[in-house]
């Protein structure tokens, strides 16, 4: 399987602190989950890949540049309806008004929110807001969906619904790259695990192997500390 992204000695230094430290990685799986302790650099790595941050060194080598969308832990909602929030992303990409509305309604229906399309987005529950952000991303038909702790602030029922949507987006053909602190969620979603510790990529392993027999002491310690 050919990689869709090759990361070569990627580094990011801010305020004299090395946050990402010569990270090298080849991503080829359909669904990759990045795990690591708090402060390990997981979110920073995703932001570098998405282009929100610029590296201090190294390179991101894309064999073919993929269309992307990113969803964050805390949903960012415009002061308008759920529908208008989804339309906004489409219009930024140059879609006509009628086409944007049609695609936005289809996307809201896919995440089960068509009945509340005209409600103010900021008055929705946290789980509903996160589903709106997923609808906004899905409407763009991304080839790569990047998710940074998408269920960290949600209750179990909302988390399960978000997982269902992520799996459906993956089934539609999008590659998934995400971080999570929920090890059960990582098991359910990932094909492979990338483990990062203190800004360094220390392990890249198929998901079953990672949880059964992690290769590094850092990963072994992490699993021991995070498993109830």
Image (cartoon, rainbow, N blue to C red):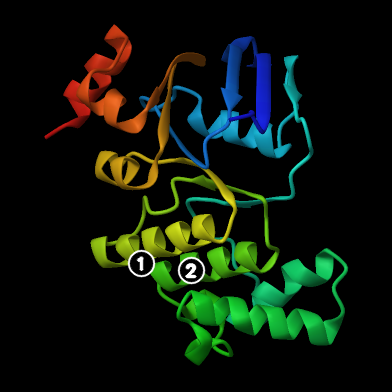
Mark yes or no: residue 51 visible: yes
Looking at the picture, how far across and down is residue 169, in whole percent?
A: 53, 60
- Which residue is at the front of the view, 53 or 211? 211
Image vertical order of residue 67 relative to residue 13, above or below:
below
Decide which of tag 2 and tag 1 comes sooner along the chain.
2
| Mark drawn on residue 209 | none
Looking at the picture, how far across and down is residue 99, in whole percent?
A: 80, 82
Circle 1 residue: 161
Disc 2: CA contacts within 10 A as few (<14), some (14-19) or many (>=20): many
Give residue 88's quadrant in the image. bottom right
Residue at position x 79%, y 39% in the image: 65
- Which residue is at the front of the view, 120 or 91? 91
Quarter containing the C terminus: top left
Residue at position x 58%, y 90% in the image: 118
Give residue 162's quadrant in the image. bottom left
Quarter containing the N terminus: top right
Circle 2 residue: 131
Q: Are marks 2 and 1 in contact (CB under 8 Å)?
A: yes
Please state which of the two labelled residues, at mark 2 or mark 1, is closer to the viewer: 1
Residue at position x 48%, y 74% in the image: 111
Disc 1: CA contacts within 10 A as few (<14), some (14-19) or many (>=20): some
Mark yes or no: residue 81 visible: no
Image vertical order of residue 106 relative to residue 157, above or below:
below
């Amino acid at each position: 399987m050919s990689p869709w992204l090759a990361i070569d000695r990627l580094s990011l230094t801010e305020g004299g602190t090395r946050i990402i430290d010569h990270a090298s990685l080849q991503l080829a799986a359909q669904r990759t989950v990045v795990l690591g302790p708090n402060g390990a650099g997981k979110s920073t790595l995703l932001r570098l890949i998405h282009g929100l941050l610029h590296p201090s060194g190294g390179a991101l080598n894309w064999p073919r540049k993929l269309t992307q969308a990113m969803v964050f832990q805390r949903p960012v909602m415009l002061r308008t309806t759920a529908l208008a929030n989804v339309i906004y992303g489409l219009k930024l990409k140059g879609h006509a008004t009628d086409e944007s509305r049609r695609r936005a309604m289809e996307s809201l229906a896919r995440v089960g929110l068509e009945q509340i399309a005209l409600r103010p987005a900021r008055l929705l529950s946290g789980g509903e807001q996160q589903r709106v952000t997923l609808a906004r991303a899905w409407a763009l038909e991304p080839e790569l969906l990047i998710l940074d702790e998408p269920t960290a602030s949600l209750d179990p029922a909302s988390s399960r619904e978000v997982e269902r949507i992520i799996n459906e987006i993956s089934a539609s053909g999008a590659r998934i790259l995400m971080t999570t602190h929920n090890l059960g969620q990582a098991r359910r979603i990932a094909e492979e695990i990338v483990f990062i510790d203190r800004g360094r990529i220390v392990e890249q392993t198929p998901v079953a192997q990672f949880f059964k027999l992690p290769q590094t002491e850092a990963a072994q310690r992490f699993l021991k500390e995070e498993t109830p």
